Image (cartoon, rainbow, N blue to C red):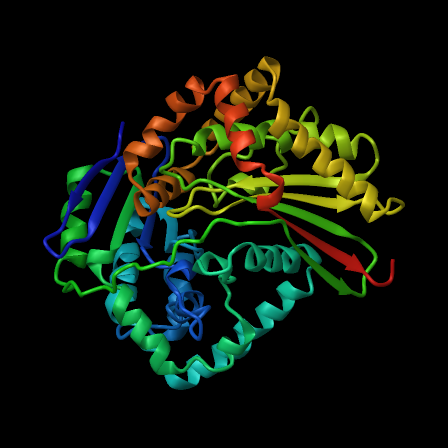
Amino acid sequence: MDARATSLDNGMKVLVREVHTAPLVSLWCWYRVGSGDERPGLTGVSHWCEHMNFKGTTNIPRDQVKGIIDRYGGFWNGYTWVDQTTYMETAPREALDKMMFIESERMSQCLYDAAECDSERTVIISELQGNENDPDQLLDTEVAATAFRVHPYGHPTIGWLGDLERISRDDLYTHYQNYYCPNNATVVVVGDVDTDDVFRRVERAFGQIPPAATPERRRTPEPPQLGERRVTIEREGTTAYLKVAYRAPAVTHDDFVPMLVLDAVLTGAKGLNLWASFRAAPPQRRSRLYRALVDERLAAAVGGACLPTVDPYLFMVSVTVAADRTRREVEDATLAVLDNVAASGITAAELERGVRQLRARMVFENDSITNVAHQLGFFETVTDLDTLASLPARIARVSVEDVSRVAASYLVAHRRTVGWYAPLGA
C-alpha cells in the first residue's frame, strides 16, 4: 500500500504507510534543518541541538527519556546531516501514543538547561576529537572543506572546534525555536496501524502546537571550480588514505540517477538509505576501481558515495592504500580509471550489472518498517515522494549514453579535489 499524506492546520506534514507483517510501528519526526543551514560562527549548532533534545522536556524528566521506549522493548535514535535533523522510535504498536508524546514534547517543550548545554559541549568536542583521530573521517572533512569554498556543505556536521567552544545556550535555544516547529516538520508512521486512526492521533498530539516563522533557507551557490584542488594531512600513522571528490548533481537533477549508476560501475552499488545502505559492503568485485586497485594489490579497500541532497554535493571515491605501495602509484592508478571512464564511457555489460545491483540494493532498503519510514521521511524532506517513487523506473531507463555523458561532464580533472592522509610513521 502506498503512503497516504495529510497536513495539519499548523502546517505539519504527516505520512502513513500500513505494513501489517508484524505488530510493530516505526515513527520518525523530520525537521528541514541541518549543517547546510548554518553560518560561520554557528557551525555544529544543528547537531548540538539534536543532542540537547534528548535531555528532557517540560513533561519528560531527563532520566526518563530513554526508559519510555525501552519499556516496550523498542529502540530509538536520531541523526543530523546537511539538510535534515531526524528522530525515530520503533516499537510494538501499543507504544504509538508514547512515541507521539515524545516527539510532540521534543518539538515544543525542550528545556535547554544552561548547565546541560555546557556539559554537552564537552561531549560534542570529545566526539569531534574522536572523529579527528580516525584518518578516514578526518580526511573526508578536509576534502569537503577544500571542495566547497562558499556553500555551507563545506562545514562538518559536527561543527568546527572554534565554534563549538563559543556557542552559547542562547544560540542553541534560538536555533531550536527557529526550526523546531510543526510547519518545518514531517511525521512519518509506518507499521501495523490504521491510517485514519493515525491521522486522528497525530492531530491530538501535535495539532495544538503553533507554527512559527522559520528562517528562509539562503545558501550561497558554490561557484564553478577552475582548477584541481589538493589537501594533504600529515600525522603519525601507518596507513595512507586517498580521496578524490567531484561535484555531484542535486537529487532533483536529471543527472542524479545516471550518477548513481556510474558510482555502481566504479565502486559498487550502495543504494540511497543513509540509515541502512552503508552498513553492508557493496557488491564491488567486478567494479572498475576494485579490479584496478584491490585486485592489483595497490589498495586494501575502495569505496564511493553519491548521496541525495537538496543542493549539489560531492561524488567521492575513497581508497585505503596497501601497506607496501607508494602514494604516487596508487594515485596514478586511481586517476587513470577515473579519467578513462570520463573519456571513453562505460560498456553495456557494466550498465546492466550496475543497474541490476542498484535496483536490488533499493529493494533490500525496504526490508523493515524502520527503513521504509526513513526513506519516506528523508525524500519528503530533501525533495518529495514522487522522486522516491520514480527512482526504480528512472534507473531502469538509464542508458550507456546517459552514464557516459555524466562521466564526461562531472569527472573533469580540473574540477576535482584530491586529498591525502600521509602517515608520518609510514
Q: Position of residue 56 (x, y in %)?
A: 35, 72
- In the rendered image, the quadrant that contains the N terminus is top left
Side of 203 where 119 appears, left or right: right
Residue drawn at point x = 26 percent, y = 68 percent:
178
Residue extending furthest toward the bottom: 115
Can you say whether 313 is above or below 396 in the image?
below
**Numbered circles on residues, count:** 0
Q: Is the C terminus in the top left, top right, bottom left or bottom right quadrant?
A: bottom right
In the image: residue 410, left or right of residue 138: left
Q: Is residue 140 above or below residue 178?
A: above
- Using the rendered view, name the quadrant where residue 67 is placed: bottom left
Residue 269: x, y in percent? 57, 31
Q: Residue at coordinates 70% horizontally, 31% vertically from top-left?
A: 337
As drawn, 220 above or below 351? below
Quarter of the image holding residue 105? Answer: bottom left
**Residue 13 % position (x, y):** 21, 48
**Front residue of this view, candidates 258 and 342:** 342
Left/right placement of residue 44 relative to residue 283 reads: left
